[in-house]
Amino acid sequence: MNSLRRFLRAATVALAVLPGLSMAAYPEKTISLIVPWAAGGSTDILARLLAQHMTQSLGQSVIVENRSGASGNIGSAYVARSKPDGYTLLVGSMSTHTMNQALYATMPFDGVKDFTPIAELALVTNTMVINPQLPVNNVAEFIAYAKAHPNQIAFASAGAGSTNHLSAALFQKATGVEMVHVPYRGGAPAVLDTVAGRTQLLFSAGTQTLPHVNSGKLKLLAVTEDKRSPLLPNVPTVAETVPGYELAVWYGAFGPAGMDPAIVQKLNQEINRILALPEVKKQMGDIGVQVLQTTPAEFQQTLQRDADKYGKLVRELGIKADD
């Protein structure tokens, strides 16, 4: 009997150290959530909500680190080079993982191969807004006005190759309108100059535009997703006027390539639990962000699909990050 007990104890210890079966002990130390942009944006807000709730439920500190620069490449590369042990994670976006590969001549990582997708977190309501002095009230009227005034409408962006830029370039390609691109160093000045009337059009996340829409300083014409946002059900999509037009902006949680599948699954379940909390859904909904519930496999499919789709689109439009 004693020999049997010794055998069972030894077998238990052996199983505990096998790869993939040590997940029960995770986490044993602080987890870092890397945000590859400056503090204060919607990605940062979402990451801090996750960190707060994960700290409470996982029993270890979860901290947010902002490592901004190079359109998200600096922070993303830091995570790609980190040990795949589940203690350094990334809250990235569609742009860092599907567009940058085509925008930059050289990249410090591969947006698909160098990461482990954990969970798609949210969709950002991407809006088409204009300065109210422009005499149009919908997308069809805007197209007619722009065609009657070629190169007299200036559209703002957060920089060459940004999702703002890509949204407008796609709109020009789909409609044949000719406009002038005015790139800024970030989204905030692009919004402010559209409010001031120095530029007339902006495609941007609702997190940045909706407060100005609500105050009457910007006019909301449409959203850019393929279907109406549940957060703005009365606002039409661009595609209702321009068939086939779509640009969806998502956020996701990633780890470095090669993470233990058991740890990935544990993180996925914990993140989905947090995103389902009514207070989290409301807080994100109030700033134009729709939280999601996905499996790692579903997020992998979205990642690969959009890397192919938007990479091809960027190359077709001839957009470069240094334009």
Image (spheres, rainbow, N blue to C red):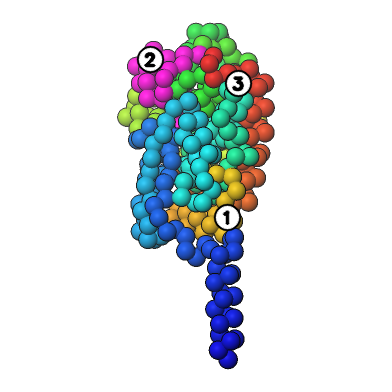
Q: Residue furthest front?
A: 3
Q: Looking at the image, is 96 positioned above or below residue 323?
A: below
Cβ atoms under marks 1 and 2 closer than 8 Å:
no
Let me know if residue 202 is in the magenta part. yes
Q: Secondary structure at mark 2?
A: loop
Instruction: Tell me the quarter of the image containing the N terminus.
Output: bottom right
Name the residue rendered at 67%, 33% in the picture: 308
Cβ atoms under marks 3 and 2 closer than 8 Å:
no
Q: Looking at the image, is 261 positioned above or below residue 98?
A: below
Q: Residue 118's spot in the image, x, y percent?
A: 55, 49
Q: Residue 66's spot in the image, x, y percent?
A: 39, 36
How dense is the environment of label 2, judged by Cα within 10 Å: few (below 14), some, or many (20 and up)?
some
Q: CA distance from mark 1 to mark 2?
A: 51 Å
* Magenta-tinted stretch: 181-205
Residue behind mark 3: 105
Residue 102 visible to an observer of this rendering: yes
Q: Residue furthest left?
A: 215
Name the residue rendered at 56%, 85% in the picture: 5
Name the residue rendered at 60%, 28% in the picture: 101
Label 1 or label 3, whichever comes before in sequence order: 3
Q: Residue 174's spot in the image, x, y percent?
A: 64, 22
Q: Looking at the image, is 157 positioned above or below residue 180?
A: below
Residue behind mark 1: 260
Instruction: Tell me the quarter of the image containing the C terminus.
Output: top right
